[in-house]
Amino acid sequence: MEIQGNMHIEAERALVFDRFTDAAFVAQCIPDVQRVQTIEEGRSYNVTVAIGFGAAKSTFDTHIEFLEKMPGASARIKAQGRAPGSRTDVGATLALRDSPSGGTEVEWSAEIEITGAIASVATRMLLSVMRTFSAQFFDCAKGRIERPT
C-alpha cells in the first residue's frame, strides 16, 4: 500500500531536514516507540514499536536505514520489521523545498508491505491505521519544530 502527504512547517528548510533525519527527535513523535538503538550514527537504527490494528496489536523490531540524504533537500529510507508471525517492509521518501510565503514545504511518501498474521487479521484496517499513524507522527513533528520546548 502507498500513503503520501504534504505539509507546511514554519521553519527554515535546514532545520526541518535536521529534525526529520535525527533519530532522537523522530523517536519522540513515533506513537508507541519502545526503544531506539543507534547502529551507525546518522545512517542506521534498530527501533522497537508497537502497532495496533483494531484488537490485534504487535510489537515490531525494525531496522531502519537511510539510503540517501541530500542535506536540506531530501532523504530516502528503507525499514524492515518483524513481529511474531508478521513482517513489514517500508520504503519512504521525504522532499523539502522553500515555501514562497516563508517556511518549508514537506512532501513525503511511503510504500508499505505488511505480511503474515497481522495482514490476514487486519487487512481492511491497514490503510486506515497507517494513515492515522502517519498523521500522528507528522503533526507531532510539525508542533515540535515550530514550537520547540
Image (tube, rainbow, N blue to C red):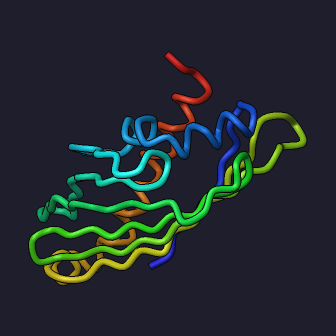
Residue 74 position within the rendered picture, expressed as x and y whole percent measured from the top left:
68, 56
Measured as percent of width and height from the top left, residue 84 is found at 9, 71
Locate the N terminus and report the quarter of the image it occupies. bottom left
Within the image, what quadrant is residue 14 found in?
Answer: top right
Q: Residue at x 57, y 21 (%)?
A: 147
Measured from the top left, where is residue 120 in percent x and y?
18, 84
112 with respect to 60 (left or right): right
User: In which quadrant of the rendered view does residue 33 lie?
Assistant: top left
Judging depth in this view, the residue of 48 and 142 nearest the camera is 48
Seen at 48% across and 71% down, the residue is 91
What residue is rendered at 28% in x and 46% in y? 37
Give the image location of residue 77, x and y in percent: 51, 64
Is residue 44 depicted above or below 118 in this figure? Answer: above
Q: Residue furthest front?
A: 40
Residue 4 showing in the rendered view: no
Res. 49 visible in picture: yes
Query: Could you tell me which residue is drawn at 56 percent across and 37 percent down?
Result: 19
In the image, 82 versus 4, the foreground residue is 82
Q: Quadrant of residue 59?
A: bottom left
